[in-house]
Amino acid sequence: MPKAKRNNEPDIETGANQSSDTSTETVDVEQMIAEAAYYKAQQRRFAPGSEMDDWLDAEREITARHAEG
């Protein structure tokens, strides 16, 4: 009788994990937010004091785009 696979074990035939790719998707969204925040800081010539605003603005923009589909 074949051994039951755990959800996070790769499928031997396809090499794919049984679990969803939500962690990869989260990392991608976080990376997009970080890049958008960087470009916002770059536009203001990296003047100190607005880093949190850059991040929060970027987060709102990326989250809204991501929700749209």
Image: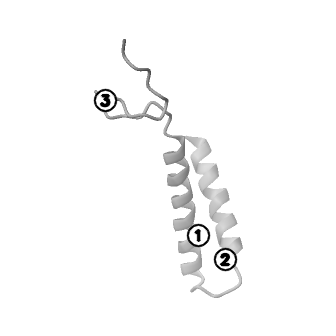
Where residue 30 sits in the image (x, y, percent)?
Answer: 56, 57
Check the image and report above or below for 33 versus 17: below
Q: Splitting the image into 4 quarters, where does residue 45 fall?
A: bottom right
The answer to the question of whether label 2 and label 1 lie on touching residues, with beta carbons closer than 8 A, is: yes
Where residue 68 sits in the image (x, y, percent)?
Answer: 59, 42
- Mark 3 burial class by Cα count in 10 Å: few <14, some 14-19, many 20+: few
Mark 1, residue position: 37
Q: Amino acid at mark 1?
A: Ala
* Residue at horizontal 62 percent and vertical 63 percent from the top: 58
Q: Amino acid at mark 3?
A: Ile
Mark 3, residue position: 12
Secondary structure of the residue carrying tag 1 is helix
Q: Nearer the viewer, mark 1 or mark 3?
A: 3
Mark 2, residue position: 51
- Mark 1 burial class by Cα count in 10 Å: few <14, some 14-19, many 20+: many
* Residue at horizontal 69 percent and vertical 65 percent from the top: 56
Cα–Cα span, label 3 and label 2: 45 Å
Identify the mark nearer the N-term, 2 or 1.
Answer: 1
Q: Nearer the viewer, residue 30 or 5?
A: 5
Q: Splitting the image into 4 quarters, where does residue 62 fall?
A: bottom right
